[in-house]
Image: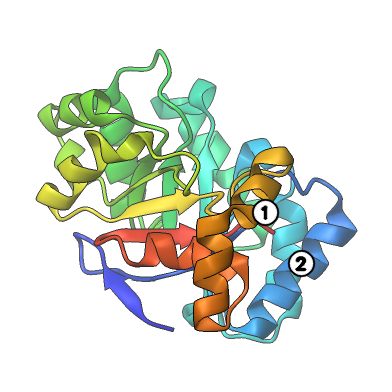
Amino acid sequence: MDYVTLNNGVKMPLEGFGVFQVPDPVQCKQAVLDAIAAGYRLIDTAAAYMNEKAVGAAITKCGVPREELFITTKLWVQDAGYEAAKKAIQTSLDNLGLDYLDLYLLHWRGAVPLAETGECMEQLKAKGRIRAWGVSNFDALDMDELMEVTGGSRCATDQVLYHLGSRGVEFDLLPWMQQQGMPMMAYCPLAQAGSLRRDLAGCAAVQNAAAAHGVSPWQVLLAFLLTRPGVYPIPRS
């Protein structure tokens, strides 16, 4: 596994494994165990996914030392204030069976001022509860605003939807992040389930590329992102 170095020196695996829309605890636990056995070391979940306990059970059982794993979860928007965030992160840590998180993300932008959330994240980092923090689903204007608040420049990443069939981030957000040297975490890089995923895998360009290189269409969709500087996909289970 290769790594990218975040802005505070923390090393994050280049590829991760997500558990979005896997609420069944048995399925989720097994999916994470299989992912770790296959070589994944970054596991991405969220309080809103309602599966942190299953992820924690897999972490406990997997047999891989904690320091080799990179665990990410997300703070829900209503919990982005000082007191609520302290309770929320403790709940997540208890669910995961961990003493600290490698990366803690604000799941969406909400009504809580960015300055308050940024300061809270910095406090959690200073106390050793998290190693790094970032945001999710922020656009370029949101990121500009975040950079203006105290501590905002310490944001390590923005995790957004990005795949061959959803390329809106290429207009302004991705160039902004590349200029800043900030890694972009791309969730659902194989598209979300349904007709779009089937259409992408079955389109002529993807099929031709797969045949030319002797790989699967899914590998082509991943390669599309892996060739983008500063983009790090986290395939969904």
Q: Residue at x 29, y 60 (%)?
A: 228
Q: How many marks?
A: 2
Q: Determine whether, in the image, residue 215 is placed left or right of residue 113.
A: right
Kindly tell me whether residue 139 is visible in this rendering. Answer: yes
Q: Please state which of residues 142 and 111 is positioned toward the viewer in this rendering.
A: 142
Work out whether 141 lies above or below 175.
above
Q: Residue at x 28, y 53 (%)?
A: 126
Q: Quadrant of the C terminus?
A: bottom right
Work out whether 221 lies above or below 87.
below
Within 10 Å of the Cα at label 1, are there few (<14), some (14-19), or many (20+) other Cα atoms? many
Q: Which mark is residue 31?
A: 2
* Mark 2 element type: helix
Q: Amino acid at mark 2?
A: Ala
Report the residue marked by disc 1: 19
Q: Residue at x 85, y 54 (%)?
A: 25
Within 10 Å of the Cα at label 2, are there few (<14), some (14-19), or many (20+) other Cα atoms? many
Q: Residue at x 39, y 70 (%)?
A: 14
**Where residue 219 appears, x then y in whole percent?**
55, 70
Earlier in the chain: of badge 2 and badge 1, it is 1
**Where residue 39 appears, x then y in whole percent?**
58, 83
* Mark 1 element type: loop
